[in-house]
Amino acid sequence: MNTVLNNATEILLLLFLIITFLQSGFDKITDWNGNISWLKEHFSKTPFKNVVPLLVGTILVTEVVAGILCVVGVYQILSAGETSTALYGAILSSVTLLMLLFGQRIAKDYEGAKTIAVYFIPTILLVFLLQS
């Protein structure tokens, strides 16, 4: 129980990332065509217009891997007090969010970019906590 209490902030932030990225990855897998269709329109006036499926596939992989690393990170914190995998998950989550932010900025979707920034704040806080 002390492990949970001593690492409550980190565990809660990891759970936040697990929900965020595994749900997003699941959504992309189960509605691939819908996501591609919407994103082709979203990026129709950008240099990304012809590579949307490749970019969505890249984001899908990074989201799922980040989510899995965060799951393993929670397990390792609870079982051994080890945080390295959690840190890798938090870093990959940060990189994924930066890729999403870049896409929103290229698409000139500034409201969408603000939303990504809201997710980035707790994620970078988690990186900081896990490095300490």
Image (cartoon, rainbow, N blue to C red):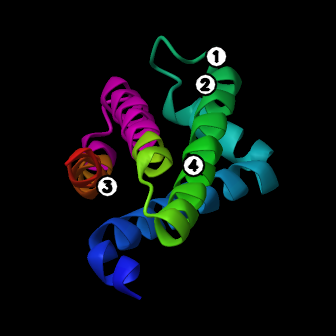
Q: Which residue is mark 2?
A: 55
Residue 20, percent from left and from top: 50, 61
- Which amino acid, mark 3? Tyr
In this rendering, the count of numbered labels is: 4
Which is closer to the viewer, label 4 or label 2? Answer: 4
Q: Which mark is residue 51?
A: 1
Q: Residue furthest bottom?
A: 1
Cα gap from disc 2 to disc 3, whole angstroms = 20 Å
Residue 125: x and y, percent? 21, 53
Point 58% across, 60% down: residue:
71
Q: Which residue is mark 4?
A: 69
Name the residue rendered at 42%, 67% in the picture. Answer: 16
Span of residues in magenta: 90-113
Residue named by callout 3: 119
Q: Nearer the viewer, residue 101 or 36?
A: 101
Give the alpha-carbon distance from disc 4 to disc 3, as whole Å: 17 Å
Judging depth in this view, the residue of 48 and 95 nearest the camera is 95
Q: CA distance from mark 4 to mark 2?
A: 21 Å
The span from disc 1 to disc 3 (Cα, nearest Å) is 25 Å
Question: In terms of secondary structure, where does tag 2 sit?
Answer: helix
- Label ID, residue 94: none
What crowding class fits label 3: few (fewer than 14 Cα within 10 Å), some (14-19), or many (20 or more)?
Answer: some
Q: Marks 1 and 2: in contact by CB < 8 Å?
A: yes
